[in-house]
Amino acid sequence: MWFYGCSFLIVLLDQAIKSLVHASMLPGRSIPILGLLKLTYVRNTGAAFSIFSGFSPQLAIIGIVIIAGVLYMHYQIRPKEVLLQVALALVLGGSLGNLFDRVFRSYVVDYIDFTVWPVFNLADIMINVGVALILLRLFMREHKKRKKCTQCS
């Protein structure tokens, strides 16, 4: 149950921030926060780094496939695999947050701007952290397997 609760909280927080940005800023406007960090309202019709701009319907379909894959993996992985379950919950929450935008706005609201990097949002952060945790777990598993294999020799 915590898996869905975590994902739901991510979607809720992501959509609350996006709604606040959408309601209080004009697209393209920036508010300096601290140093290189700005709050900038961007309507992203593409994917990461705005690649595939204008392909929002196709990206929505890809998002649905990713969400289905995450749910499938959630049920295939043992509940004791906490790191992987947390990672999947983060990816699910972030993917749902951006999918919600694509379906109901036809673009994703991005707002975190470090000036030297493309503008992104909380959902993007959750997806990237989740993927990083999955990769970390895979590397840990491979390291454990290699260690075990060298002890056998």
Image (cartoon, rainbow, N blue to C red):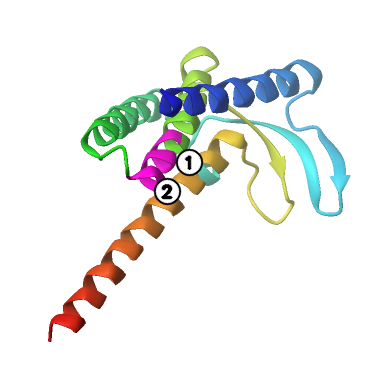
Query: Which residue reaches farthest top?
Result: 104
Residue 48 inside the magenta-drawn segment: no
Please provide percent x and percent y for residue 5: 49, 23
Left/right placement of residue 150 relative to residue 113 reads left
Asked where in the image residue 140 lies, by quadrant, the reply is bottom left
Residue nearest the viewer, comparing 137 with 31? 137
Residue 88 inside the magenta-drawn segment: yes
Please provide percent x and percent y for residue 73: 26, 36
Q: Start and end of the magenta stretch?
A: 81-89
- The local secondary structure at tag 1 comes to helix
- Alpha carbons under labels 1 and 2: distance apart: 6 Å
Left/right placement of residue 40 relative to residue 151 reads right
Other-residue count near label 1 (Cα within 10 Å), few / some / many at <14 / 14–19 / ≥20: many
- Name above or below for residue 60 compared with residue 149: above
The kind of residue on which mark 2 rests is Val
Is any part of residue 139 visible from this angle? Answer: yes
Residue nearest the viewer, comparing 114 with 54? 114
The kind of residue on which mark 1 rests is Ile
Task: Name the image quarter holding the N terminus.
Answer: top left
The residue sitting at 43% across, 37% down in the picture is 91
Other-residue count near label 2 (Cα within 10 Å), few / some / many at <14 / 14–19 / ≥20: some
Is any part of residue 98 visible from this angle? Answer: no
- The local secondary structure at tag 2 comes to helix
Label disc, if present, on residue 131 of the rendered structure: 2
Asked where in the image residue 95 lies, by quadrant, the reply is top left
**Magenta-colored segment: predominant secondary structure:** helix
The residue sitting at 79% across, 23% down in the picture is 25
Task: Name the image quarter holding the C terminus.
Answer: bottom left
The residue that disc 1 covers is: 127
Q: Are marks 1 and 2 in contact (CB under 8 Å)?
A: yes
Please provide percent x and percent y for residue 114: 73, 50
